[in-house]
Image (cartoon, rainbow, N blue to C red):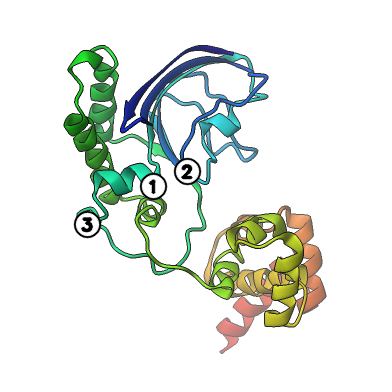
Amino acid sequence: MIKSKETILLFDQPLFTKVSMETPMRDTLPLPTGACYAYIVNGDGQKFSPSGDLSATPGQVILSLCNLTLGRMISDQPQGSVESIVVHLGQELLQRVYEGNKPQLWEELEKPVTRYVVQSAAGNLVTYYFEGIAQLFHNQAALTEELLALKLKEIVLLLLQTDNANARQIIRSLFSDRTFTFKEVVDAHICTPASIENLAMLTNCSVSTFKRKFSEIYQTTPGAYITNKRVERVADLLKVSDEAVSAIGYDCGFSSPEHLSRVFKKKYGVSPAKYRLNFTVKEKNF
C-alpha cells in the first residue's frame, strides 16, 4: 500500500514525486508521463523483473520509457518497504521547458531504442541531485517555475553525460525528430525479448496489420524470421566470444538454453557447443 505520496508540479504537470510504500501492493503505483527517472532512497531489495536485474536497492536509479516504471513493477513483490524520488520526463513538459530546442550534448538517434528500462548505481552528482530534490519537498513555498525548469534541465544534462549508453539513448529519444521505418524497428529488436505484440505497438500497428506488413516485407512469418536471425547471431558470436553458450543465447533473445539448442541444431546440424568446438578446431588446423 502507499504510505505517503507528494508531487511537485511544473506548468500543472508532475515533475517530481516522492513516494513511500509497503509491498506487496494490490494495485500498481500510478506514475504518469512516458519516461521516469527513479532514485531508490530506501528499499529491501524487492525484484522488479523476472531476471532480477531491477531491484529496490538503496542508492540505485531506474530510468524507464513507455511507462515501464516503478509503478508497473511494484505489485506482487515480497513484503517490505520502498521509498523513492521520481523525476517525470514527459515530452510535453520537456518541449515547454526547452521551448522546442534541443539540450546541450544532445545528438539525434541513429537507431531505435531497444532497452526501455535501465538500472545503475547513482554516481555522486546524481546522488547530490536527488538529495537536493528531497529538500524541495520541505521548502515548496520558495519554489518558482524558473527554479524547477533549471532542475529539470540539470538532470537531463547529467543523463546525457552518463557512461551508460542505454540511458543516453533513452534521453536522446525524448527529443528525437526521427521516424524509423517498419523494417528499422523490427531489425533493431531482433535480439531483444520483444514479443509480436510489443513489435506491433512499436510500429504503430495492430497485431494483424503487423503480421500482414511483415509478411509483405520479409516473405515469411515474424516468428520464423526472428528465430532464424537470432540463431545466426548466436553462431557469429560463438566464433569470437568466450562467453558461456547460455549467456550468448540470453543476449540474443532466447528464453532458455533448451530452446536455443533445439533451433540451433535444426539449422546447423550440431549443438551450439559442438559448433564452437568444430570452428575452433578448424582455426587451429588452418
Q: Is residue 52 visible?
A: yes
Of tags 2 and 3, the one toward the viewer is 2
The three-letter code of the residue at mark 1 reads: Gln
For marks 2 and 1, the one nearer the N-term is: 2
Q: Vertically, is 167 above or below 114?
A: above
The three-letter code of the residue at mark 2 reads: Gly
Q: Residue at x 24, y 48 (%)?
A: 98
- Left or right, 244 with respect to 31, comes to right
Disc 1, SS: helix
Q: Vertically, is 111 above or below 146?
A: below
The residue furthest bottom is 286
Dots 2 and 1: beta carbons under 8 Å?
yes
Q: Position of residue 33 (x, y in %)?
A: 46, 39
Q: CA distance from mark 1 to mark 3?
A: 18 Å
Q: Give whichever of 271, 227 is nearer the camera.
A: 227
Disc 2, SS: loop
Quadrant position of residue 13? top left
Residue bearing mark 3: 105
Residue bearing mark 1: 91
Q: Give whichever of 11, 233 is nearer the camera.
A: 11
Disc 3, SS: loop
Q: Vertically, is 277 above or below 86?
A: below
Q: Give whichever of 243, 38 is nearer the camera.
A: 38
